[in-house]
Image (cartoon, rainbow, N blue to C red):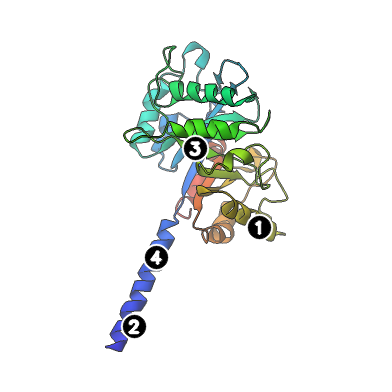
Amino acid sequence: MATARSLCFSFLMIISSLLAASSRAGKIAVYWGQNGNEGTLAETCASGDYGFVILAFLCVFGNGQTPQLNLAGHCDPSSNGCTGLSTDIKSCQAKGVKVILSIGGGAGSYILTSKDDARQVATYIWNNYLGGRSSSSPRPLGDAVLDGVDFDIEGGSPNHYDDLARYLSAYSGPQGKKKVHLTAAPQCPYPDAWVGKALSTGLFDYVWVQFYNNPPCEYSESNPSSFKEAWKQWTDGIRATQIFLGLPAAPGAAGNGFIPAGKLISEVLPELKNSSKYGGVMLWSKYYDDMTGYSKAILHSV
Protein backbone atom coordinates (compact mmCIF):
# COMPACT_ATOMS: atom_id res chain seq x y z
CA MET A 1 0.00 0.00 0.00
CA ALA A 2 2.83 2.40 0.92
CA THR A 3 4.55 1.54 -2.35
CA ALA A 4 1.37 2.24 -4.34
CA ARG A 5 0.94 5.56 -2.56
CA SER A 6 4.54 6.60 -3.25
CA LEU A 7 4.18 5.57 -6.91
CA CYS A 8 0.97 7.58 -7.16
CA PHE A 9 2.67 10.58 -5.55
CA SER A 10 5.65 10.29 -7.93
CA PHE A 11 3.30 10.08 -10.90
CA LEU A 12 1.44 13.20 -9.74
CA MET A 13 4.73 15.05 -9.31
CA ILE A 14 5.77 14.13 -12.87
CA ILE A 15 2.41 15.29 -14.26
CA SER A 16 2.68 18.49 -12.26
CA SER A 17 6.16 19.25 -13.58
CA LEU A 18 5.08 18.49 -17.16
CA LEU A 19 2.11 20.82 -16.83
CA ALA A 20 4.36 23.55 -15.41
CA ALA A 21 6.77 23.13 -18.30
CA SER A 22 3.98 23.23 -20.89
CA SER A 23 2.54 26.35 -19.28
CA ARG A 24 5.88 28.01 -20.00
CA ALA A 25 5.78 27.07 -23.66
CA GLY A 26 6.28 30.36 -25.43
CA LYS A 27 5.22 32.07 -28.62
CA ILE A 28 7.06 33.96 -31.31
CA ALA A 29 6.34 37.63 -31.97
CA VAL A 30 7.56 39.22 -35.19
CA TYR A 31 7.73 42.75 -36.58
CA TRP A 32 6.19 43.17 -40.03
CA GLY A 33 5.87 46.23 -42.23
CA GLN A 34 9.29 47.67 -42.94
CA ASN A 35 10.18 45.72 -46.08
CA GLY A 36 7.90 45.18 -49.04
CA ASN A 37 9.67 41.89 -49.85
CA GLU A 38 8.61 40.09 -46.68
CA GLY A 39 5.30 38.71 -47.96
CA THR A 40 1.78 39.75 -47.10
CA LEU A 41 0.34 40.04 -43.63
CA ALA A 42 -2.10 37.21 -44.39
CA GLU A 43 0.78 34.94 -45.50
CA THR A 44 2.72 35.84 -42.37
CA CYS A 45 -0.11 34.69 -40.11
CA ALA A 46 -0.95 31.64 -42.24
CA SER A 47 2.60 30.32 -41.74
CA GLY A 48 1.67 29.16 -38.24
CA ASP A 49 4.99 30.43 -36.90
CA TYR A 50 3.81 33.47 -34.97
CA GLY A 51 1.56 34.25 -32.03
CA PHE A 52 1.96 38.01 -32.45
CA VAL A 53 2.52 40.17 -35.52
CA ILE A 54 3.56 43.76 -34.78
CA LEU A 55 2.81 46.32 -37.49
CA ALA A 56 5.71 48.76 -37.82
CA PHE A 57 5.36 51.77 -37.49
CA LEU A 58 3.13 54.70 -36.62
CA CYS A 59 6.22 56.89 -36.81
CA VAL A 60 4.79 60.42 -36.63
CA PHE A 61 2.60 61.58 -33.73
CA GLY A 62 2.40 64.04 -30.87
CA ASN A 63 3.10 67.76 -30.52
CA GLY A 64 0.25 68.68 -32.85
CA GLN A 65 1.57 66.63 -35.77
CA THR A 66 -0.80 64.69 -38.02
CA PRO A 67 -0.07 61.03 -37.18
CA GLN A 68 1.46 59.04 -40.02
CA LEU A 69 1.71 55.31 -40.59
CA ASN A 70 4.69 53.97 -42.52
CA LEU A 71 4.51 50.43 -43.90
CA ALA A 72 7.41 50.85 -46.35
CA GLY A 73 6.82 49.07 -49.65
CA HIS A 74 3.60 47.33 -48.62
CA CYS A 75 1.14 50.16 -49.20
CA ASP A 76 0.72 53.93 -49.07
CA PRO A 77 -1.48 55.07 -46.17
CA SER A 78 -1.57 58.67 -47.44
CA SER A 79 -3.68 57.58 -50.41
CA ASN A 80 -5.82 55.15 -48.37
CA GLY A 81 -3.79 52.36 -49.93
CA CYS A 82 -3.58 50.29 -46.74
CA THR A 83 -7.29 49.85 -46.04
CA GLY A 84 -7.19 46.47 -47.80
CA LEU A 85 -5.08 45.16 -44.92
CA SER A 86 -8.30 44.96 -42.91
CA THR A 87 -9.07 41.57 -44.49
CA ASP A 88 -5.56 40.32 -43.67
CA ILE A 89 -5.83 41.51 -40.08
CA LYS A 90 -9.13 39.70 -39.59
CA SER A 91 -7.63 36.59 -41.17
CA CYS A 92 -4.75 36.72 -38.66
CA GLN A 93 -7.08 37.18 -35.71
CA ALA A 94 -9.27 34.27 -36.86
CA LYS A 95 -6.14 32.10 -36.57
CA GLY A 96 -5.53 33.30 -33.01
CA VAL A 97 -2.69 35.66 -33.95
CA LYS A 98 -2.73 39.01 -32.14
CA VAL A 99 -2.03 41.98 -34.43
CA ILE A 100 -0.47 44.96 -32.66
CA LEU A 101 0.25 48.51 -33.89
CA SER A 102 3.79 49.63 -33.05
CA ILE A 103 4.34 53.32 -32.40
CA GLY A 104 7.77 54.95 -32.64
CA GLY A 105 10.64 53.06 -34.26
CA GLY A 106 14.22 54.03 -35.01
CA ALA A 107 13.31 56.82 -37.43
CA GLY A 108 10.45 59.28 -37.52
CA SER A 109 9.14 62.32 -35.73
CA TYR A 110 7.37 61.64 -32.47
CA ILE A 111 7.21 63.18 -29.03
CA LEU A 112 4.61 63.70 -26.31
CA THR A 113 4.79 67.20 -24.89
CA SER A 114 2.13 67.05 -22.17
CA LYS A 115 -0.46 64.87 -20.51
CA ASP A 116 -3.10 66.35 -22.78
CA ASP A 117 -0.94 65.60 -25.82
CA ALA A 118 -0.82 61.96 -24.66
CA ARG A 119 -4.62 61.98 -24.30
CA GLN A 120 -5.06 63.29 -27.83
CA VAL A 121 -2.72 60.66 -29.27
CA ALA A 122 -4.55 57.91 -27.34
CA THR A 123 -7.88 59.18 -28.69
CA TYR A 124 -6.50 59.18 -32.23
CA ILE A 125 -5.16 55.62 -31.92
CA TRP A 126 -8.43 54.40 -30.38
CA ASN A 127 -10.56 55.91 -33.14
CA ASN A 128 -8.31 54.96 -36.05
CA TYR A 129 -6.84 51.57 -35.11
CA LEU A 130 -8.74 50.16 -32.14
CA GLY A 131 -12.42 50.01 -31.22
CA GLY A 132 -13.43 53.62 -31.79
CA ARG A 133 -14.79 55.44 -34.82
CA SER A 134 -12.79 57.77 -37.00
CA SER A 135 -14.16 61.19 -37.84
CA SER A 136 -12.21 60.94 -41.09
CA SER A 137 -13.17 57.95 -43.15
CA PRO A 138 -11.77 55.46 -43.95
CA ARG A 139 -9.48 54.38 -41.14
CA PRO A 140 -5.85 53.80 -42.25
CA LEU A 141 -6.17 50.00 -42.01
CA GLY A 142 -9.88 49.79 -42.71
CA ASP A 143 -12.46 48.62 -40.19
CA ALA A 144 -10.37 45.88 -38.56
CA VAL A 145 -9.87 46.38 -34.82
CA LEU A 146 -6.27 45.76 -33.77
CA ASP A 147 -5.44 43.91 -30.57
CA GLY A 148 -3.24 46.54 -28.98
CA VAL A 149 -0.42 49.04 -29.11
CA ASP A 150 3.33 48.45 -28.95
CA PHE A 151 5.65 51.12 -27.52
CA ASP A 152 8.92 51.03 -29.50
CA ILE A 153 10.16 54.43 -28.36
CA GLU A 154 13.77 55.15 -29.31
CA GLY A 155 13.96 58.93 -29.35
CA GLY A 156 12.29 62.24 -28.67
CA SER A 157 11.56 62.25 -24.95
CA PRO A 158 10.62 59.61 -22.39
CA ASN A 159 7.96 61.86 -20.88
CA HIS A 160 4.21 61.19 -20.89
CA TYR A 161 4.32 57.66 -22.27
CA ASP A 162 3.09 56.58 -18.85
CA ASP A 163 0.11 58.89 -19.44
CA LEU A 164 -0.41 57.40 -22.90
CA ALA A 165 -0.38 53.89 -21.41
CA ARG A 166 -3.02 54.87 -18.85
CA TYR A 167 -5.29 56.48 -21.45
CA LEU A 168 -5.02 53.51 -23.82
CA SER A 169 -5.52 51.00 -21.02
CA ALA A 170 -8.68 52.83 -19.92
CA TYR A 171 -10.31 51.85 -23.20
CA SER A 172 -10.15 48.16 -22.19
CA GLY A 173 -13.13 48.23 -19.79
CA PRO A 174 -16.00 47.62 -19.14
CA GLN A 175 -17.22 44.12 -20.05
CA GLY A 176 -18.00 43.55 -23.66
CA LYS A 177 -15.23 45.85 -24.86
CA LYS A 178 -12.24 44.25 -26.51
CA LYS A 179 -9.13 44.40 -24.35
CA VAL A 180 -6.43 46.80 -25.50
CA HIS A 181 -3.17 44.91 -25.03
CA LEU A 182 -0.14 47.07 -24.27
CA THR A 183 3.28 45.83 -25.34
CA ALA A 184 6.74 47.40 -25.40
CA ALA A 185 10.18 46.86 -26.92
CA PRO A 186 12.73 48.31 -24.50
CA GLN A 187 16.49 47.98 -24.91
CA CYS A 188 18.06 45.43 -22.56
CA PRO A 189 19.98 47.88 -20.30
CA TYR A 190 17.70 48.12 -17.26
CA PRO A 191 15.73 50.30 -16.75
CA ASP A 192 15.04 51.44 -20.31
CA ALA A 193 15.72 55.14 -20.86
CA TRP A 194 12.70 55.67 -23.12
CA VAL A 195 9.84 53.51 -21.84
CA GLY A 196 10.97 52.88 -18.27
CA LYS A 197 8.39 55.32 -16.86
CA ALA A 198 5.63 53.78 -18.94
CA LEU A 199 6.55 50.25 -17.85
CA SER A 200 6.45 51.34 -14.20
CA THR A 201 2.66 51.72 -14.54
CA GLY A 202 2.34 47.93 -14.52
CA LEU A 203 -0.18 48.12 -17.37
CA PHE A 204 1.81 46.19 -19.97
CA ASP A 205 0.89 42.66 -20.98
CA TYR A 206 3.87 41.67 -23.12
CA VAL A 207 7.35 43.15 -23.07
CA TRP A 208 9.82 42.04 -25.75
CA VAL A 209 13.21 43.21 -24.55
CA GLN A 210 15.71 43.95 -27.32
CA PHE A 211 18.74 41.85 -26.40
CA TYR A 212 20.71 43.11 -29.40
CA ASN A 213 22.78 46.17 -30.29
CA ASN A 214 23.62 46.29 -26.58
CA PRO A 215 26.78 44.20 -25.96
CA PRO A 216 26.86 44.67 -22.15
CA CYS A 217 23.57 42.80 -21.67
CA GLU A 218 23.05 40.68 -24.77
CA TYR A 219 23.98 36.98 -24.82
CA SER A 220 27.66 36.17 -25.17
CA GLU A 221 29.35 32.78 -24.83
CA SER A 222 32.33 34.44 -23.21
CA ASN A 223 30.22 36.19 -20.58
CA PRO A 224 26.79 34.55 -20.19
CA SER A 225 26.38 35.86 -16.64
CA SER A 226 25.74 39.46 -17.77
CA PHE A 227 22.90 38.24 -20.00
CA LYS A 228 21.40 36.14 -17.19
CA GLU A 229 21.60 39.08 -14.83
CA ALA A 230 19.89 41.39 -17.33
CA TRP A 231 17.10 38.86 -17.91
CA LYS A 232 16.60 38.55 -14.14
CA GLN A 233 16.45 42.33 -13.78
CA TRP A 234 13.66 42.49 -16.33
CA THR A 235 11.63 39.57 -14.98
CA ASP A 236 12.00 40.73 -11.38
CA GLY A 237 11.81 44.46 -12.01
CA ILE A 238 8.62 45.13 -13.94
CA ARG A 239 5.00 44.12 -13.56
CA ALA A 240 4.20 42.56 -16.92
CA THR A 241 2.34 39.39 -17.77
CA GLN A 242 5.12 37.99 -19.94
CA ILE A 243 8.68 38.91 -20.93
CA PHE A 244 10.04 37.92 -24.36
CA LEU A 245 13.61 37.57 -25.53
CA GLY A 246 14.02 40.02 -28.42
CA LEU A 247 16.52 38.91 -31.09
CA PRO A 248 17.55 39.68 -34.67
CA ALA A 249 16.32 36.92 -36.99
CA ALA A 250 19.53 37.07 -39.04
CA PRO A 251 23.09 38.32 -38.48
CA GLY A 252 22.41 41.24 -40.82
CA ALA A 253 19.25 42.31 -38.99
CA ALA A 254 21.22 44.13 -36.28
CA GLY A 255 24.73 45.31 -35.52
CA ASN A 256 25.20 42.44 -33.08
CA GLY A 257 23.28 40.10 -30.80
CA PHE A 258 22.35 37.31 -33.23
CA ILE A 259 22.24 33.88 -31.55
CA PRO A 260 22.42 30.80 -33.83
CA ALA A 261 19.24 28.73 -33.55
CA GLY A 262 21.00 25.67 -32.18
CA LYS A 263 22.69 27.63 -29.44
CA LEU A 264 19.44 29.39 -28.55
CA ILE A 265 17.67 26.06 -28.19
CA SER A 266 20.38 24.26 -26.23
CA GLU A 267 21.88 26.97 -24.04
CA VAL A 268 19.63 30.02 -23.77
CA LEU A 269 15.97 29.02 -23.75
CA PRO A 270 16.28 26.37 -21.00
CA GLU A 271 17.64 29.07 -18.69
CA LEU A 272 14.89 31.56 -19.54
CA LYS A 273 12.11 29.05 -19.04
CA ASN A 274 12.96 28.90 -15.34
CA SER A 275 11.08 32.18 -15.04
CA SER A 276 7.29 32.09 -14.68
CA LYS A 277 7.21 35.32 -16.73
CA TYR A 278 8.86 33.77 -19.76
CA GLY A 279 6.69 34.46 -22.80
CA GLY A 280 8.75 33.46 -25.81
CA VAL A 281 10.92 35.10 -28.47
CA MET A 282 10.47 38.32 -30.43
CA LEU A 283 12.16 38.59 -33.82
CA TRP A 284 13.20 41.56 -35.89
CA SER A 285 11.91 41.11 -38.50
CA LYS A 286 9.70 39.06 -40.85
CA TYR A 287 11.95 39.99 -43.79
CA TYR A 288 15.07 38.66 -42.06
CA ASP A 289 13.20 35.64 -40.74
CA ASP A 290 12.33 34.73 -44.33
CA MET A 291 16.05 34.84 -45.17
CA THR A 292 17.12 32.42 -42.43
CA GLY A 293 14.06 30.36 -41.49
CA TYR A 294 14.89 31.20 -37.88
CA SER A 295 11.35 30.99 -36.50
CA LYS A 296 10.75 27.57 -38.06
CA ALA A 297 14.05 26.32 -36.60
CA ILE A 298 13.13 27.35 -33.05
CA LEU A 299 9.32 27.08 -33.14
CA HIS A 300 8.96 23.78 -31.31
CA SER A 301 11.56 24.73 -28.68
CA VAL A 302 10.18 28.16 -27.78
Residue 206 in percent (x, y) is at: 50, 43
Q: Please provide percent x and percent y for residue 65.
A: 60, 16
- Mark 1, Cα crowd under 10 Å, few <14 / some 14-19 / many 20+, is few
Badge 2 marks a residue whose secondary structure is helix
Question: Which circle's residue, 4 or 2, is located before the other in the chain?
Answer: 2
Q: CA distance from mark 1 to mark 3?
A: 25 Å
Specify the label residue 182 is tagged with: 3
Q: Which residue is mark 2?
A: 6
Using the image, tell me which numbered label, if any, was put on residue 229.
1
User: Quadrant of residue 70 in the image?
Assistant: top right
Q: Which residue is mark 4?
A: 18
Residue under the image location 36 percent in, 25 percent down: 87
Label 3: few (<14), some or many (≥20) within 10 Å?
many
Where in the figure is residue 202, as x and y percent of width and height?
Answer: 53, 44
Name the residue type under label 2.
Ser
Residue that appears at 44% across and 53% down: 300
Viewer-nearest residue: 230 or 291:
230
Report, in whole angstroms, how far the alpha carbon at label 3 lies from the one at label 2: 46 Å
Q: Is residue 187 left or right of residue 273?
A: right
Numbered-mark total:
4
Label 1 vs 4, first from the N-terminus: 4
Mark 1 to mark 4: distance in Å?
Answer: 27 Å
